[in-house]
Image (tube, rainbow, N blue to C red):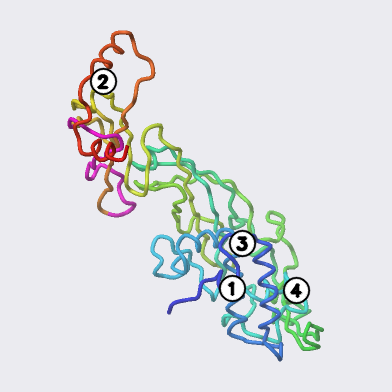
Amino acid sequence: MNKKDYYEILGVSKTATDEEIKRAFRKLAKEYHPDNKQTGDEAKFKEVGEAYAILSDPTKRKQYDQFGHQAFTNNGGANYSGFSAEDIDLSEIFADLFGGSFSGFHNFNFGGNSRNSKRPRKGEDSLVTVNLTFEEAVFGAKKTITLDLNEKCFKCHGDGGFHEVTCSTCGGSGTVISEQRSLFGVFQTQTTCPTCGGSGSSFREKCSKCDGKGYTRERKDIEVNIPEGVDNGYQLRISGKGSAGQNGGPNGDIYLEFKVKSHPLFEREDEDIYLNVPLTITEAILGTKKEIPTLTGNVILDVKAGTAAGEKVKLKGKGVKKVNAIGKGNMYVIYDIIIPTKLSMHQKKLIKELASTDLKDSEEFRKFDRYL
């Protein structure tokens, strides 16, 4: 099914700030909340929650901007984040924005998942900017990146403590039911247990190594192979190398976003390479053989007599390799005729002698002179 654009759902532009996105979400959430008798709409309520869950997260927003909904589906290929609408905990999102009265929502089921802190959860994704030279981006490279990640605590094996007991506040359910006053009146809500945080249990002894969190923050060096042909802004996903998951959930992913340094001669546009080649006026008039650099070494070009400024020559297959695909782009040579600004007396004499000859024997000059 074709899903509606998240920006369109919230009614904001793609350049909207975090505050504009949050403001639009709050307005729509109040409008479509199922307990709103006038404008409540359960389907739209879920829709705006899903849109906000993506656009309010900097990493997921970048992925969505680059790959659209494909970034969050199993068909997303190398850029699949492992995230889906089923992973969205809307009750937590709404509680953060609107306060406790919006947590639980009259036992409303968000995306089919109930709040349960014991369910396996994927670890956090990380986005890392990697600086590359022009050559590293074109030909690929090996890089070592250093980043801080959540690692499962080896002392408590990720549990956060020892000697587990059933929570006395919620009786092991992980939730408590209370009567709350909301924007739409008084109604009963089901909220996460404040004592156990929704786990349904607690520990007699908290782990001193991780302070009860179940993970510790560790600095890690990760070696990555960067494929040929990446460009500015390209993202590469390293699956399962991110922060540790919770309750047996998988590790998160690492996303590398590349920042490529410009080249002093070559300009790149997708897989094509452009090179401006300077010619003297005599080379352009008489023609010449010109040695030029390419990505794979120097070649000799035959510059034909009468070459005009801006004339373009294509060198097929001399561009950049397509990432993880067969084939290369092309290289385009653009001739730039350089007019000398400093001449010797001898050179001036030769130019004057040339100027005294008929250099206007062409249709272009005749067409122009007819209007004088």
**Residue at the spot 31% in from the left edge and 51% down from the top edge:** 322
Secondary structure under badge 2? helix
Which amino acid, mark 2? Ala
Label the magenta part by its dominant secondary structure.
Answer: loop
Mark 3 nearby-residue class (10 Å; few <14, some 14–19, many ≥20): few
- Region of the chain picked out in magenta, as a range: 304-325
Secondary structure under badge 1? loop
Q: CA distance from mark 3 to mark 4?
A: 21 Å
Residue at label 4?
98
- Label 1 vs label 4, nearer the camera: 4
Which amino acid, mark 1? Ile
Residue at label 2?
355
Secondary structure under badge 3? loop
Which amino acid, mark 4? Phe
Label 4 or label 2, whichever comes before in sequence order? 4
Q: Position of residue 239 (x, y in %)?
A: 45, 58
Mark 1 nearby-residue class (10 Å; few <14, some 14–19, many ≥20): many
Which amino acid, mark 3? Ala
Residue at label 1?
88
Asked if labels 4 and 3 touch by Cβ distance under 8 angstroms, the answer is no
